[in-house]
């Protein structure tokens, strides 16, 4: 392939870019609503199990496949296993990226709307936040306009190049968002009446368990870690030869989980403390669905002095966290079209942009369409992609190649026990767990 590939410039840039992809609306918007739906602490426990048993091993695997091939998500399989159908796994990943963007960009648009509402002072004057969100949901034109704006913003970064665009933005903004979430969590847990919310998060209550608990938690783990669609393959292809894959994966997974749990620590104590109907709060949370973040948080800001500043800062950082995720999503599809069909990067980015906007319009117009894209990608397409990548690395890929990648150009010495555990997780644990969860989740 004649295309010259860039690599990430600095060590911190590598972790920041991968963490920037992982940390996004998945943590702050989707995680709390899934946790509410899944019964609180019990959902979080299963979720953390998914991160440990297949999240981290699969992230190492995606990085490894990307760096060994230095190619896009589909080209990677093609290069490592020429002439086999494995490249279809990569293609499925590219399609998944597309499907995710089709609804994700709509939520990104909501963050912009809330940013403007914060800046203009509108949000501090609202008394019924559920109604405020319902007005936005009932206005497809507004949603479409902001969705398109966000998509174009992402395109702008994609066109400005991998290093400058992705790395710089992620490095500065992630730590800021993290700090802000800590401040908000402290405010939330010290509200009067926050205790039941903290309990909901930390004390498993088996009476809320749903039959799809495992499927939901697994889907959320894949979604939040940006796994199963080749996003981390694409980023791994930009890694330097010496980047330690396991360490990077653990760092990303820990950061991602911390941000999600922190977001929970902000949302649930606030929701319980600020509700007018404590008796029905759990069912209200479930019914709140995708709106949870956009209803509860502004309510919390209104309890704080200088609410306008807090909410502006928060929605600004949230939009930026979302942007580093949409950049990674768009990058996967763009570089695939660019490398596989030899179309200039610029033109392929424009194709992708047009496609996203078409899907995004349908998602803005129809909540069921939005939900179908969400469920299809997170609960089905990503885990299927994850299943195949674990089979590919565990059963198909040459052990020496795996060893070379894990030793990062000879700078590390992965021990026998480590290698054996890693391969065992990929060969048996991850695929069997994913399949079992599918069968169990679908049998109901
Ligand atoms: N992980 C991102 C988030 O949590 C979403 C995402 C999924 C990004 C898949 C890239 C690939 O918001």
Image (cartoon, helix red, strand yellow):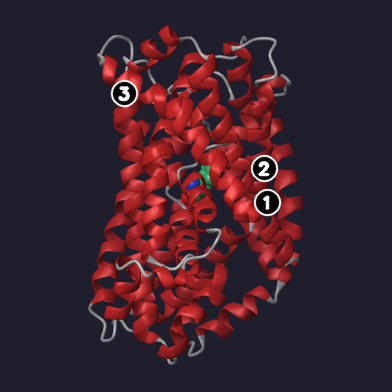
Which label belongs to residue 324? none
Whether 310 is drawn above or below 387: the answer is below
User: Tags 3 and 2 in contact by the CB under 8 Å rule?
Assistant: no
Residue 412 position within the rendered picture, expressed as x and y whole percent measured from the top left = 25, 15
In contact (CB < 8 Å): disc 3 and disc 1: no
Q: Is residue 379 visible?
A: yes
Is 241 located above or below residue 177 in the figure?
above
Q: Position of residue 130 (x, y in %)?
A: 54, 82
State the image quarter where residue 329 is shown: top right
- Residues 272 and 43: in front is 43
The picture places residue 420, in percent across and down from the top left corner, at 34, 19
The reply to whether the C-beta atoms of the residues labelled 2 and 1 are less than 8 Å apart is yes
The residue wearing badge 3 is 244
Q: Earlier in the sequence, mark 3 or mark 2?
A: 2
The residue under label 2 is 98
Q: Determine whether the residue tagged by mark 2 lies in a helix, strand or loop.
A: helix
The residue at the point 41 percent across, 87 percent down is 275
Quadrant into which the N terminus falls: top right
- Front in this rendered view, residue 98 or 276: 276
Q: Quadrant of the C terminus?
A: bottom right
Circle number at residue 102: 1
Local secondary structure at mark 3: loop
Q: CA distance from mark 2 to mark 1?
A: 6 Å
Q: Residue at x 50, y 72 (%)?
A: 292
Which residue shows up at 70% across the image and 74% down it? 139
Residue found at x 38% / y 58%? 44
Q: Is mark 2 within 8 Å of ligand 1?
A: no
């Amino acid at each position: 392939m004649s295309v010259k590939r860039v690599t990430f410039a600095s060590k911190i840039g590598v972790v920041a870019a991968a963490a920037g992809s992982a940390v996004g609306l998945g943590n702050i918007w989707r995680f709390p609503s899934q946790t509410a739906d899944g019964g609180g602490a019990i959902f979080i426990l299963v979720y953390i199990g998914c991160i440990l048993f297949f999240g981290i091993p699969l992230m190492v695997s995606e990085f490894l496949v990307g760096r060994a091939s230095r190619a896009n998500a589909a080209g990677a399989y093609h290069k490592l296993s020429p002439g086999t159908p494995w490249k279809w796994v990569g293609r499925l990943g590219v399609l998944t990226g597309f499907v995710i963007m089709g609804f994700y960009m709509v939520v990104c648009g909501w963050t912009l709307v809330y940013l403007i509402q914060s800046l203009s002072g509108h949000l501090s004057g609202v008394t019924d936040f559920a109604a405020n969100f319902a007005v936005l949901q009932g206005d497809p034109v507004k949603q479409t306009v902001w969705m398109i704006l966000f998509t174009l913003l992402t395109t702008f970064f994609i066109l400005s190049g991998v290093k400058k665009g992705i790395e710089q933005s992620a490095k500065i903004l992630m730590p800021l968002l993290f700090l802000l979430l800590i401040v908000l969590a402290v405010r939330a847990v010290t509200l009067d009446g926050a205790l039941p919310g903290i309990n909901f998060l930390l004390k498993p209550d088996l009476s809320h368990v749903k039959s799809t608990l495992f499927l939901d938690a697994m889907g959320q783990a894949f979604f939040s870690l940006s796994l199963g669609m080749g996003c981390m393959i694409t980023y791994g292809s930009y890694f330097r030869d010496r980047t330690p894959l396991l360490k990077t994966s653990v760092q990303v997974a820990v950061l991602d989980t911390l941000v999600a749990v922190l977001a929970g620590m902000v949302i649930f104590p606030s929701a319980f403390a600020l509700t007018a109907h404590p008796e029905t709060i759990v069912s209200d949370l479930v019914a709140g669905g995708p709106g949870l973040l956009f209803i509860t948080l502004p309510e919390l800001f209104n309890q704080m002095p200088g609410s306008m500043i807090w909410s502006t800062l928060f929605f600004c950082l949230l939009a930026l966290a979302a942007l580093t995720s949409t950049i990674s999503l768009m990058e996967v599809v763009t570089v695939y079209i660019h490398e596989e069909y030899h179309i200039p990067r610029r033109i392929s980015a424009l194709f992708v942009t047009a496609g996203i906007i078409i899907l995004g319009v349908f998602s803005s117009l129809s909540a069921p369409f939005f939900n179908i894209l969400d469920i299809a990608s997170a609960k089905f397409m990503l885990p299927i992609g994850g299943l195949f990548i674990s089979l590919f690395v565990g059963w198909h890929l040459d052990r020496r190649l795996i060893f070379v990648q894990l030793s990062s150009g000879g700078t590390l010495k992965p021990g026998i026990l480590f290698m054996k555990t890693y391969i065992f997780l990929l060969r048996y644990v991850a695929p069997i767990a994913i399949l079992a969860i599918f069968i169990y989740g679908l049998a109901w």
